[in-house]
Image (cartoon, grey):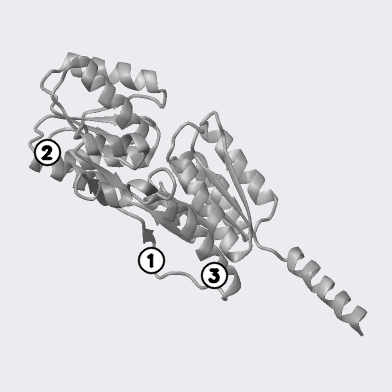
Amino acid sequence: MKKLVMAGAALAMMASTAIAERYVMITHTQGTDPFWPVVEKGGRDAAAAIGADFEYNFDPSGDMSGMAKLIEAAAASNPDGIVVSLPDPDALGGAIRAAADAGIPVITMNSGLENSAKVGALMHVGQPELLAGQKAGERAKAEGVTNGLCLNQEAWNTALVDRCEGYFSGLGGSLNMIDVSNDVQQIETRTAAALSADPSIDGILAAGPHVCDAANKAIKDVGADVHLACFDMSDAVTAMLRSGDASFTIDQQQRLQGYMPIIVLHLYNTNAGMLPGANIPSGPGFVDASNIDNVASQAGINR
């Protein structure tokens, strides 16, 4: 009898292993932005919480065709769900739609809110980027900025363009955005050149944390008096907020962008298609000198 019980337990364990859910997350990072490891951690934490397998992939080249191929490969492996960022709907939409048409539930995250449903995704988890940029612009204007500049490290990324357009919507004036790339040296060089070419620039919005850090160095090199605002959290941004080099950063809580899609997909797959009634906004929220001490220990880890 004891042997039968043990054999039954072993079979149960084997069955449990065989039916473990598996989720694949694909994002548009090149592996250089400190933002994305926090997203990945969120996905892994969620998968661990529900006992699912988790795979995280990105194309180091940053090429959208390479990212589309990763989506196609993920779909071919027939996972229980795919989580994908959507910075370029034209380049990625076909692969996402094909996965959805094949019966694989897809949730978009981070970028692509406006096009998520159009490409067949169940929902989107992320920050409304145009609104986030607008809030940043309104605050910058209230803090004295009259002539702004937006630094975009991924000119093809619709989410970052939305941040810059929103900034000038809130600030007032025509869009003034430059492509600084993801290379730190290029960010510093191009920012310094822009400031030298137009000394009337008195406000900069950096669309990413590493961009903000590099922009701060460029501002100091040029000797300009510029209001600096950031997007997202990092150790460097934390230090700039504490020193006063940056006025504020917009926190989109990227761990939620990795965590929530996995939980939602799990509920969808195990509870007869259960879904939230709307997309899940993870931001925007301001972090500045008044509250940095409350969130600093989580920067680069959980936010």
Q: Are marks 2 and 3 in contact (CB under 8 Å)?
A: no
Question: Can I make out residue 105 in this image?
Answer: no
**Quadrant of the rendered image containing residue 71:** top right
- Residue mark closest to the camera, 1 vs 3: 3
Give the foreground label among 2 and 3.
Answer: 3
Which amino acid type is shown beneath numbered disc 1? Ala
Q: Work out whether residue 171 or residue 65 is closer to the camera in this orientation and state it.
A: 171
- At horizontal 80% and vertical 67% (from top left) the residue drawn is 14
Q: Is residue 77 above or below residue 143?
A: below
Q: Which residue matches tag 2? A: 172
Query: Residue 278's mark?
Result: 1
Residue 123 is left or right of residue 201, and the answer is right
Q: How many other residues sit within 10 Å of disc 3, few (<14), some (14-19) or many (≥20)? A: some
Spatial distance from mark 1 to mark 3, Cα to Cα?
A: 15 Å
Q: Is residue 287 above or below residue 192?
A: below
Q: Which is nearer the eye, 180 or 238?
A: 238
Q: Marks 2/1: CA distance? A: 31 Å
Q: Amino acid at mark 3?
A: Leu
User: Residue 267 has which mark?
Assistant: 3
Q: Is residue 273 above or below residue 81?
A: below
Whichever of labels 2 and 3 marks the residue nearer the N terminus, that label is 2
Point out the tag, 1 or 3, that comes first from the N-terminus: 3
Of residues 5 and 273, the one nearer the viewer is 5
Q: Quadrant of the N terminus?
A: bottom right
Q: Is residue 221 left or right of residue 11?
A: left
